[in-house]
Amino acid sequence: MAGEISAVALLLRVRIERRAANPAVFVLDVSLDIPPGITILFGTSGSGKSTLLDCIAGLVPPDAGQIKIGDAIVFDSENRVNVPPQRRRIAYVFQSLALFPHMTVEENVAYGLPHLPLDQRTARIGEVLQAFRVENLRERRPAEISGGEKQRVALARSLVTLPRVLLLDEPLTGLDAELKASIVDDLRAWIAAQKIPVLYVTHTREEVDALGERVVVLDHGRVVNQGAPHEVLDAPRRKKLAQVAGFENLLDATVVELREIDGVMRVRLAESSSEIEVPLGYAATNDRVKIAIRAGDILLATQYPSGLSARNILEGKIVSLEPRGSVIVARVQAGVAFTAHLTPGAACALELTAGKPVWMVLKTHSCHLISE
Amino acid sequence: MQSLLLSIRLAACVSTILLVVGLPLAYWLAYSRWRGKFLVESVVALPLVLPPTVLGFYVLVALGTQGPLGRFWQAAFGHGLAFTFTGLVFASVLYSLPFAVQPLIASFESIDHKLLDASAVLGAGALRTLRRVILPMSAPGVVTAIVLSFAHTLGEFGVVLMVGGNLPGSTRTISIDIYDHVESLEYAEANRLALILLVFSFVVLSIVYGVNRRIGRRVWAPWPAK
């Protein structure tokens, strides 16, 4: 087998501007090399994942850039090359699957092979139906088969054409883990034989773990990270300073202990003996880090609270209380100065006054680790 | 009876031509992204709001020996178009255009666009997509278009009177015939023909609404079905 099929990568340089109503303009600007094998495109909805796939498939023309499959250029804005989707030999499985409802499973799978002689066509269809375990459904229509079966048929229909690239837009959403895993195994087996680049879009973490050799993280139309899944997605729950603008509490701290199994770490707040638990981040013991906490995420109690799921309870004293709009801003000294927000009703019910001892409750995931 | 057969012949010609002309027109109107598309949509819908006499008047002018179409026809075939069956077909095609095009547009537009994308990605060009995906999925719309343009042509009066006049065997359609009978106070004869038209129209509309109901979504009908 080795050397028989030359492995071909997909090279992308794509820029597209979309004038949406709100916010004014969405810009997708991506430069990527996708090697053969499965690459996960990970990102929240609206990060530009589907638009990128549409560009690669030729359904949406980028404003500028170049798309190459190996040496074959399918799009080049400078040389005005734009190969239509029909001739790109790129398979695309949509989230909605888009099976033709008026055709049987077999007719659906045969749709991409009109020019093949009948015997070859029959052989190819039989092979792919078998590979995706849907042979027994040949005569059924999409409305008559289950969700998982539809997903298998959609994969079979795309792959029967022996595409140069496979694009998958969340094709396995809504399936339970076991079913998903079995479809993924069949898909992986097929791809291993073909050695083609596969771009698999998802926004769920489990699929990344189940599938990915590589993951590319897309955020607001830009690639923000790429690499092996555990490198890219485990450590950096770290935010940029700009993202925590408006966080009232910004605290210096030193890492005391990493507890990777629990996905948390303990940090000591600067110039105090108070320790809190925060989500695990890229950091080693004794590293100096910054922690951001919203004033609205801090709970105040007048007695030592018990029976809580929150892991961080800090003892302190009220320094001042001042009303601001509909909230009361409480300054609390707990080795370090904190700012907490509470409603006037709550302040009244707790009979809070300056100098009163209080306990602050912080959920682990309300503490955001930020990079310098 | 001669007038009924003439009307049926006219309606059959018109709905056949409208299917041939209407399919590409509706395809273009449903999928084009041209910004001036609304102008064409308005022109297609004009016969819905124009009095038949207005439409008939302009068609008559165009078909007459001084009109562009009439002169061309005169040169090519040696006779004019006004007050002929062929002239009637021209006028009726225009008059029934929206009744063929709008149901087609409605059913084309109701097809999930992802299916068309899927077809393209699987290598199918526009014609194959039309033949294998769009048309089979819009069969109810095609039926509605044929039936409505047939029925609408069968019942027209004003345009025929303007363009065709009243020549037995070539332009005297059933509705003109009814008018004639009433004018000459032959109410029994008028009633017989009117009843045929009434029953026929009812059957046709039942087919349209029945199709709409059976497929569970609305295709298009002259006014909304409950």
Image: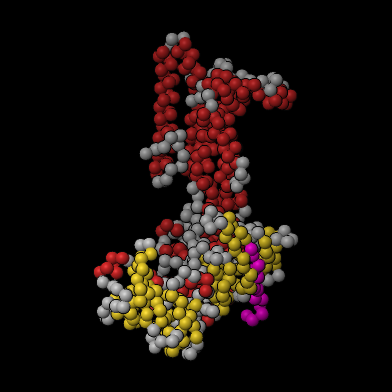
The location of residue A345, given as percent across then percent down, is: 28, 65
The location of residue A153, given as percent across then percent down, is: 49, 64
Residue nearest the observer in this picture, B42 or B9: B42
Residue nearest the observer in this picture, A153 or B43: B43
* Residue with the most extreme top position: B184
The location of residue B118, given as percent across then percent down, is: 55, 58
* Quadrant of the rendered image containing residue A28: bottom right
Above or below for B64 versus A235: above
| Quarter of the picture holding the C terminus of chain B | top left
Residue A8 part of the magenta-drawn span? yes
* Residue B224 seen in this snapshot: yes
The location of residue A129, given as percent across then percent down, is: 50, 67
* Residue A106 seen in this snapshot: no
Residue beneath the point at 45% across and 79% down: A251
Q: Is residue B195 left or right of residue A186?
A: left
Magenta segment: A1-15
Residue beneath the point at 39% across and 74% down: A339
Residue beneath the point at 38% across and 86% down: A274
Above or below for A189 versus B135: below
Residue beneath the point at 55% across and 64% down: A48
* Quadrant of the rendered image containing residue A292: bottom left
